[in-house]
Image (spheres, rainbow, N blue to C red):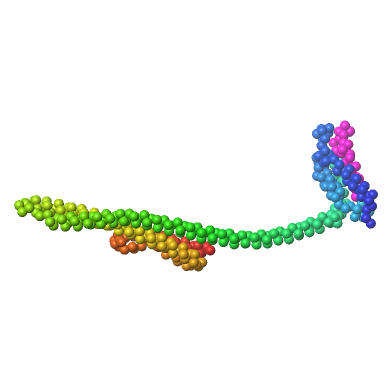
Amino acid sequence: MATTPEKVTNILSLLDGVTSRPIDQLISNKDWGTINFEAARADLTLLFDLCNHLKLLPIQLIPDSIADAFIASITQAGTTIQKIRDFNIENGNPTGVRDQLVNQVKSHAEHLLTTTQGWIAFLAYQKGDIQKNIEELTNAIASANRLLDTSKNEIEAKQKEIASIVSAARDASASAGVGVFTADFESHATALEKDAAKWFRFTFTCAIGTLIVAFLSIFIPIDKDATNAQIFQYISSKLVVLLVLLTATIWCGRIYKALMHQITVNKHRANGLRTFQAFVKATGNEAIRDAVLIETTRAIFANSPSGYLDSADAASDTAGTKILEIIKGTASSTKAIG
């Protein structure tokens, strides 16, 4: 049979009486001097914890006989607690009284624990806290799993989106870079064309001057009475003039050929970059892109023959070969990582 409301009210009143004053105020008091109840702190804490638990539980569910046992144990504990509150060192043998009260607190705490420990667990379950906590925990786990699945899907979607953005950015930056370098090569070739035209005029002028001087030298006679020294001086002066003009013509011609070589190479590089850009836009095949990239690199960095320079004047292709090997190695490493 369940406990009557009157007994429930009585139990709650007794529990409030036990816990009405904080433990620290029971442990020490300025009027007690050096005497305190520190030795009873652990037992007081246990006693207060049991009382506070019972306040929150549906004690009306316990049998009537058990309620009587609760009332008896709590009443005894409350009596001892009240004695501690009323403790006065002016009474005879305060230390002995203190020790006696400490032992009583220990005894009451153990008795209340023995009386209530099984019923506290039962009442807590009946209150629904355990079941409620289990249900809340189960719901929380289910919610966390749903959130985890949703997060995984979102992360996968974001990864794909980021990958597409990075790919688009890479393609855009590559196209922009190719466009810039193509314009640089073409503008440099245009600037060199102006210089080449100027040196062509210098070469042509020097060649015409050489021919004119050589032609006029034929019609300048040597004096019949000239000595050998005068003849030698005459011939050597004409040879020096012709040699200077011929050297100037050859020198200007070599500069013109070098400029035309650079113009041709720069145009070849611009066409190579433009071809690479066209292949990139036309295909998504990585193998084709790599092949075109290597050939484009060869067109840019390798020493391409233009026909204006002799093989003896052409530079070594060692640097271009090294760069090509670096590009190939980088492409292989990128594929291995991917």
Query: Residue drawn 12% across and 56% down?
Result: 219
Left/right placement of residue 276 relative to residue 53 reads: left
Residue 278 location (% of width, % of height): 46, 64
Where is residue 297 shown, x and y percent of the image?
42, 62
Specify whether residue 222 is painted magenta: no
Which one is in front, 1 or 208? 208
Between residues 236 and 203, which one lies in front from this camera angle? 203
The image quarter in which residue 321 lies: bottom left
Q: Residue at x 29, y 55 (%)?
A: 199
* Residue 283: percent from left, percent from top: 50, 67
Q: Main secondary structure of the magenta part?
A: helix
Furthest residue in direction left, as rendered: 225
Residue pictured at 94% horizontal, 52% vertical: 4
- Residue 81 part of the magenta segment: yes
Give the answer, above or below, for where 84 lies relative to 226.
above
Q: From where the camera sits, is residue 322 visible?
A: no
96 shown above or below 251: above
Query: Can the viewer see residue 33?
Result: yes
Picture residue at 55% right of the left edge, 59% below the top? 166
Vertical order, 70 against 291 (above or below): above
Q: Quadrant of residue 34?
A: top right
The quarter of the picture where residue 75 lies is top right
Apparent side of residue 283 relative to residue 70 in the rendered image (left or right)? left
Between 62 and 209, the one nearer to me in the picture: 209
Of residues 246 and 146, the one drawn nearer to the viewer in this rendering? 246
Residue 210 pos. (x, y %): 20, 56
Number of dots carrying numbers: 0
Image quadrant containing the N terminus: bottom right
Residues drawn in magenta: 70-99
Q: In this image, 127 relative to 156: left or right?
A: right
